[in-house]
Image (cartoon, coloured by chain):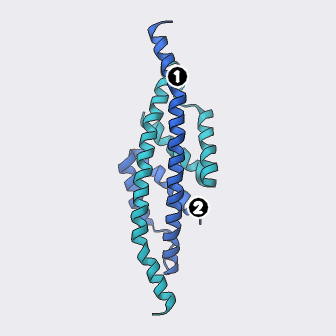
Chain colours: A cyan, B blue
Amino acid sequence: MSVTEMSAEAELDTIPVLRRQIDSLDEAIMRLVAERAKLSTRVQTARMSAGGTRVQLGRERVIMDAYRTGLGAHGPELADAVLRVCRGTR
Amino acid sequence: MSVTEMSAEAELDTIPVLRRQIDSLDEAIMRLVAERAKLSTRVQTARMSAGGTRVQLGRERVIMDAYRTGLGAHGPELADAVLRVCRGTR
């Protein structure tokens, strides 16, 4: 086995470890989004009890921009999905 | 001002506090996704250096199912957006 084959094999061996770390990050991401959904529901309830709308597009645009700044081109897609999860729990 | 109007007003006063908490959660979510993107890039690199593909659909389905279990109907949309952010950084 050549040196390159050995290093490719060693690289492959790292994948299961990296995947377990990714799985832990996914669990943490889901916990944060679930927590966010609870807070978002409270905001929606407070706004509607005062006669306001459930969704505020101006506020959602601010959130989209924050995700674009934080994560680049795909950030707004993630923000949109997060917002849908948070709206979805109504 | 009636009792209901007072309580609606008190509810409205909670919105700025709740929004700041939501903003902190969004920052934490973005940090975790950025960290996940780094790990995902390492997996893609390891797999390709051993002659494999950059994306593994079987693995992505496992992740989608985990997000559906964790967050319900909109979970897979969030997983899809997370995966796109992680693929996007290549």
Query: Which of the pair A45/B17 is nearer the observer?
Result: B17
Task: Give the amino acid type for the residue marked by disc 2 in the picture.
Answer: Gly
Vertical placement of B71 versus B89: above or below? above
Q: Amino acid at mark 1?
A: Asp
Q: Residue furthest top?
A: B1
The residue shown at (55%, 63%) is B87
Q: CA distance from mark 1 to mark 2?
A: 40 Å
Residue A85 spot, x, y in % from top left: 46, 42
Q: Position of residue B49 (x, y in %)?
A: 52, 79
Residue B13 is marked as 1
Q: Residue at x 52, y 18 (%)?
A: A51
> Left or right: where does residue A58 sit relative to residue A49?
right
What is the chain letter for disc 2?
B
N-terminal of the two: label 1 or label 2?
A: 1
Above or below, A37 against B83 in this view is above
Q: Image quarter for residue A1?
A: bottom left
On what subunit does the disc labeled 1 rest?
A: B
Residue found at x 46% / y 54%: B79
Residue B84 at least partly seen: no
Mark linked to residue B88? 2
Horizontal side, residue A13 vs residue B36: left or right: left
Using a 10 Å C-alpha cutoff, classify the residue at mark 1 as few (fewer than 14 neighbours), some (14 to 19) or many (20 or more). Answer: few
